[in-house]
Amino acid sequence: MTPAVSFTKVSRHFGTVRAVDAVDLEIQPGEFFAMLGPSGSGKTTCLRLIAGFEQPTAGHIRIFGEEAQGVPPYRRNVNTVFQDYALFPHLNVLDNVAYGLMVRGIGRAERHKAAEEALALVRLPGFGARKPSQLSGGQRQRVALARALINRPKVLLLDEPLGALDLKLRESMQEELKILQTSLGITFVFVTHDQGEALSMADRVAVFNEGRIMQVGTPQDIYQKPRSRFVADFVGSSNVLPPDFVQRYAGQRRWGSLRPESIRVARQAAGEGVQARVVALNYLGSATRLSLDAGGLRLHATVPAGAALPEPGEHVALTFNREQLHLMEEGA
Amino acid sequence: MTPAVSFTKVSRHFGTVRAVDAVDLEIQPGEFFAMLGPSGSGKTTCLRLIAGFEQPTAGHIRIFGEEAQGVPPYRRNVNTVFQDYALFPHLNVLDNVAYGLMVRGIGRAERHKAAEEALALVRLPGFGARKPSQLSGGQRQRVALARALINRPKVLLLDEPLGALDLKLRESMQEELKILQTSLGITFVFVTHDQGEALSMADRVAVFNEGRIMQVGTPQDIYQKPRSRFVADFVGSSNVLPPDFVQRYAGQRRWGSLRPESIRVARQAAGEGVQARVVALNYLGSATRLSLDAGGLRLHATVPAGAALPEPGEHVALTFNREQLHLMEEGA
Amino acid sequence: MTAATITSPPANPAILPARGGILSSLSDLFWRRPKFLLLLMLLPPLLWLGIVYLGALLALLLQSFFSIDEFSGMINREFTLKTYSELLLPSNIDIILRTVTMAALVTVASAVIAFPIAYYAARYARGKWKALFYLGVMLPLWSSYLVKVYAWKLILAKEGILGWLLEKLHLTWLLDAWLSLPIVGGNSLSVSFTGTFIVFVYVWLPFMILPIQAALERVPVSLTEASGDLGASPGQTFRHVVFPLALPGIVAGSIFTFSLTLGDYIIPQIIGTSRLFIGQAVYAHQGTAGNIPLAAAFTVVPIVIMGFYLWAAKRMGAFDAL
Amino acid sequence: MRSDRSTSAPLALKLAAAAGLLFLHLPILLIFVYAFTTEEKTYQWPPPGFTLRWLAVTWNRPDVWQALSLSVKVAALSTVIAIVLGTLCAAAVSRTRFFGRETISLLVILPIALPGIITGIALRSAFSLMEIPFSTWTIVLGHATFCVVVVYNNAVARFRRTSGSLIEASMDLGADGFQTFRHVVLPNIGTALLAGGMLAFALSFDEVIVTTFTAGQQQTVPIWMLEELVRPRQRPVTNVVAMIVVLVTALPILVSYYLTRDSDQIAGAGK
Amino acid sequence: QLKEIGPAEGQVTIIAWPGYIERGETDKSFDWVTKFEQASGCKVNVKTANTSDEMVALMNEGGFDLVTASGDASLRLVAGKRVQPINVDLIKSWSAVDDRLKNAPWHTVDGVHYGVPYMWGPNVLMYNTNVFKEAPKSWKVVFEEMTLPDDKTNAGRVQAYDGPIHIADAAQYLMHHKPDLGIKSPYELNEDQYKAALDLLRQQRKLVGRYWHDAFIQIDDFKNEGVVASGSWPFQVNLLKSEKQPVGSTIPEEGATGWADTTMMHVDAPNPNCAYMWIEHSLSSNLQSDLAVWFGANPSVPAACTDGRGMLTKEGCTANGFDDFEKIRFWTTPTSKCASQNDQCVPYYRWVSDYIGVIGGR
Ligand SMILES: Nc1ncnc2c1ncn2[C@@H]1O[C@H](COP(=O)(O)OP(=O)(O)OP(=O)(O)O)[C@@H](O)[C@H]1O
Ligand SMILES: Nc1ncnc2c1ncn2[C@@H]1O[C@H](COP(=O)(O)OP(=O)(O)OP(=O)(O)O)[C@@H](O)[C@H]1O
Ligand SMILES: [Mg+2]
Ligand SMILES: [Mg+2]
């Protein structure tokens, strides 16, 4: 199957800044693909390369097998939901949504009908007459979505579309987006710096750092089998264990990662396992998170709601299953 | 003991908008008090009433027992960390921190010394000569904190101080703030709309909605024993169960709340418990969240990592312990 | 961490005592009565603009209801509408129409010429270049208006620099062809409406560039990108996105170009056909002819026109772009 | 617009912008050229020769100095008044919302939105009605009126950009109203006021239309130029004066540009 | 009215035609101010005005001591009570004034003198000598479309004065070419005559690119704009000649309008003593002599032609038309009360608005 988007050794440098650096990537048709990474890691630049707002300084981009070199954005069948939504402030919602059809010369009645349908799809029927400034953040986000979808793109690019929304709204939009993607079957490429969002929504995740892809894989892969300290640390709040420590428990001198929920905390200080002192407790509702000091190593463990909790300052023993301790491939 | 801050039937109306509506509240000295609520619920207005930027339209505010009516902000021994930090852009970090002492007429050498100490306290020693624009978000936040603390306020008000920070930074600042408050013993009043933040940091939480306080209590109280649907829904993503449903399982016609982690999911459809269909799965890393359709009722359940997961569309049976089902006092 | 330096000493009141002194109690007063402070702040500018400016303006308008004794030129201070009937004489109507047409043309032309400059400055110029652009627009704005106008007289005169240049380029026929046209033509550019028009455009152009640039600078790039992304060609993007969003800036700029053209009496005097413009008529009636009532009646015309203009501009939100 | 990240300007746009700028500047170059011509009576093109003589001649003309000193005096006074009035107005309008707020911003804009000749003859007829004799102050009265808006616009823009919480932060830290004004408000809007003031100064310095009506027999630089251009004695002298004025105003313009630009970044960085 | 001249106030402010009051700034040899200032202790401030209307307006506004008003302004100033009678007994040189001017109607009302004569002269036809090898005979070159001696049309190459009083020039032309209209005086026109004059001016409008308003701008126009013929003042002719420009001037066969200017004193003159001193000075024969040369006009003190105290000579006086006094129709303000047309004349205010209309192309 031809990949929806493929990068072959694609680089985009701005002067000395290597925003995207020799990236190889294949995104499959119909996939929900997430790009995850810290600020400045090159995610947006990648997206802009696909949309055609940036030109690669080296390498090739293919969209459904066709070379994208030299094709301007308005001739790529790819649409973008911008981080700031970029709704046209002088047009009402209906005309915003119908914009893509208007510039294609579709008649007024027909494009308004299509726009109404697109608005219904994002559950905003009847909002057509409002101006973007009269909408809430979540509503704007959905208008931007409808506007991008009306062109029936083969690939939809979303740049941190949920970044500006508050938690409750973000959660419900995540669900909606996922459902929409499944029902339309369009390839979604989704940029975020929120690991929770990437894990819960994507079919596959690419973790970026400093213009390079650190790891590509399913959320489970990424979460449970990080290949490097960076990935382990960035995706969820893993405990990254130094080689010394790992050697004691797994016999190999490699860096390891251990998820907080894999650690069991026993209140008897002298018991088996790693000795540690409780530094702080954080009540999370569904669980309580302990900050622990294990001989200078700062560890986190979560204790599920209902279980007995130690006091701050108390000495505890930590145990975990060997197989939960993931050994990383790379040294760094 | 005199409360640090007490509200007696305090209202603040803007025209027809009841930003704060007949609120009664007591905050104890040395307490870490969080105000939690959706956007526009009146949290900021409450804080501004304490600081003296707003005047109550009705009711009385007392600070350590003294009537605050008619006392301008600069005569209240209360300091604020603003949401946007409000650092003076024309002053360097040291002068920002020393500002409170300067306007009190403290000499240059003395106030700079105190400012250096305050900077050390927030772990920014040697940053004095920079301009605020040369600091990162987290650093600015800490300068704002040092600036507020240098006046030795009896109450420190913080308006969503972590809102603008990204996840990793937010988590580490949460920890630092908590430690600082414990060691200084100053009363902290903390506004947030992030329930996780409120639960993990506060000694007590007040949940606001539409200018009124819905519930005040410890995080555990609020999370496990919400008094109303609003609180249950807003604090953590609880399943709110209608009276009909509750009657079947608890024998009382009351609204109930059930935490997603309290639900056990069994893959045999015909088994005991509530019959439901899996609508969607969200991988959260440490667990997987299921969206379920139980005869028209939308429920969420979390399945810990490692447990067997159903497929979307599969029929499952849900069970839970009766005591986990919390019955709410109020109807609404 | 040394918490000790910060923790409160035992006697630390929750409410600090008033500091005393006039300034301090005044400050308390302002805090308790913000309306009073507001009034205090507004009073001087309102008095100034209200009394000096509006007062003078009203006094002037009042005089348009007086009339002038034709022979001695003394003002007859009795209420009459005679002056207004004089304003409606065909020759005066001509003046008004001529001026308004010129103002409209000048405005349109300024906008057309200003747009690329503003667009480039807003969108592409960076750092030093941006400063250079700014200087490049501001310098002509602040360099002596009169000397500029005179420079144009030298350029446009029959035996002037433009003629000299065209002769060198063997293009004199082009100029002659243009000058032989009715209305816009004339004996030479400096005695034609074309000349007046060119100089007006030149002199007011910076007033158009700056607000357009300001408006364009407020348009996020993502909007033009979004337009391209949705399939609009650069031309379509300009028509449907960039232009509509720059419109408030254009309107703001046109307030200047329009109003300045309506009132100017120096340019058409130096470069033009001797046919009067409103500004000249006002100047002539008040200065040369001493007919203050008619001059005052004439000023009503630009006031009314600009009144409508400002009203429309306000509705378009052009004030923010000023 | 923010920076367009990568694409450079299309050629046609570059050409149009360059042509526009050229159109703006060539006549000014002409002024410069004629400041050095050897021909005294007429503006002969091309100039028969070049000389630096006119610089010295200008230096020794007492009327130039008189006009210059009056212009500086008027511009300085008008600027001070405009700064005070403009700032008060901007502060009132941007800090609070009150009834009639829109009307006030309209009122401030009016003196430049209406043709200058109207301001001019309105003031002049008011002066003659009230029998106020012409003096420096009658000129200042006119100039300050239309200079207010320049300061006002700059100040309003800065107030809008300066986070309102700065003032609250200051009060919160124990500064009363006056301390807050001195230590927070003034330093933050200072550069904007300075920039506005400079523009106001330049505006007043070059004003001719209103001045004709309010100056009586006094000569400011533009009035002197008007007289001098029409009734020439030594024509290049006018050009020398014009050239010097251009060169001298370039500096404040550049300074005001950097003042407003840099502090925008600082003020914007608060959030 | 002043009874005796007191001490000088230190200054005097005069509204004057351009070129009337010179302190050597345009040409060093023409200076009749500096010495006066030194002798009298009165600093002289000059406000130049380009038209009679402007002068009247300035006087109405006030703040001035003296004005050099032409005949079309002087009576208006008297009627408007803007000027005060002059006590000629205080002016020593009054006796030297030309008898033809002493009681001229444009400054003497009911036997009261409202000023002293300053200077008089004709409105000449100035022409380019490269185009006209010999002086044009008729004003026709500026009124009707024709081919000039250089075989090019006159359209666009002639000018006319930008003041309503120019209607009188047209009337004077018609007086000569259309005698059946019955014009007796170019300043006294009935409706028909007036209409004919306007029609002529409308025709002229097609020939004129820009009207001249300011003496110096007309000078520029002759130099840079290719203007070859226009009604003008001797002043411009002299200046252009001094710059070696190819111009000449003539009084064509139709005769000419002209001006006879009077120094008048404002009712509220702030500096009456200095004003009287200036009036006295203005009649000194060396001033009259130099001014006549400078402006190309005629002195109001006949001795100036001959006594050799200034630059003027007898021949110069003749050249400037000193002997043509009777032929010149001096500017006066048209009023509806006019002897020659049974008080049916078109008054001046209509001249003003109609002339604006004509220039506007209506
Ligand atoms: N036009 C440009 N000129 C210079 N550098 C640029 C440009 N665009 C991006 N960069 C740089 O390239 C790097 C990658 O930027 P990019 O916007 O792709 O990051 P990102 O991963 O999207 O970050 P964020 O999460 O903050 O949006 C950054 O260091 C950025 O400063
Ligand atoms: N100065 C004001 N004038 C009018 N209405 C106001 C004013 N300040 C606040 N309000 C209104 O009062 C209500 C409460 O506002 P407040 O800022 O206290 O909410 P909040 O809980 O802090 O919300 P957020 O989380 O968005 O900051 C809102 O509806 C707001 O619009
Ligand atoms: Mg990005
Ligand atoms: Mg808030």
Image (cartoon, coloured by chain):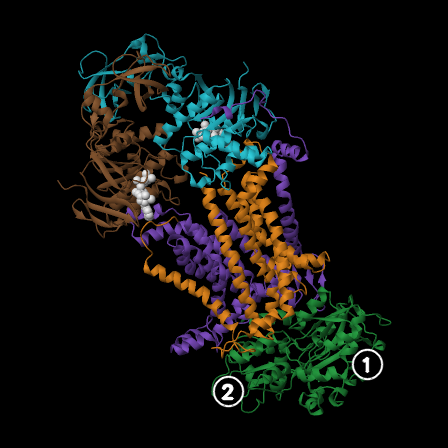
Chain colours: A brown, B cyan, C purple, D orange, E green
Which image quadrant is residue E80 in? bottom right
Q: Is residue B233 above or below residue A329?
A: above
**Subunit ID for the residue under disc 1:** E
Tell me the kind of residue under disc 1: Trp
The residue lying furthest to the top in this view is: B251
Residue that badge 2 annotates: E148
Residue type at the position of mark 2: Leu
In this picture, residue B140 sits left or right of residue E286 = left
Image spot of residue C174 (x, y percent):
39, 75
Q: Which residue is mark 1?
A: E94
**Taking C273 as reference, is B264 above or below it?**
above
Task: Classify mark 2: helix, strand or loop.
Answer: loop
How packed is label 2: few (under 14 Cα within 10 Å), some, or many (20 or more)? Answer: some
Q: Give the x, y percent position of residue A187.
A: 21, 38
Left or right: D44 in relation to A293: right
Residue at the location (62% across, 42% down)?
C41
Residue D183 is situated, as x and y percent measured from the top left of the image, at 57, 39
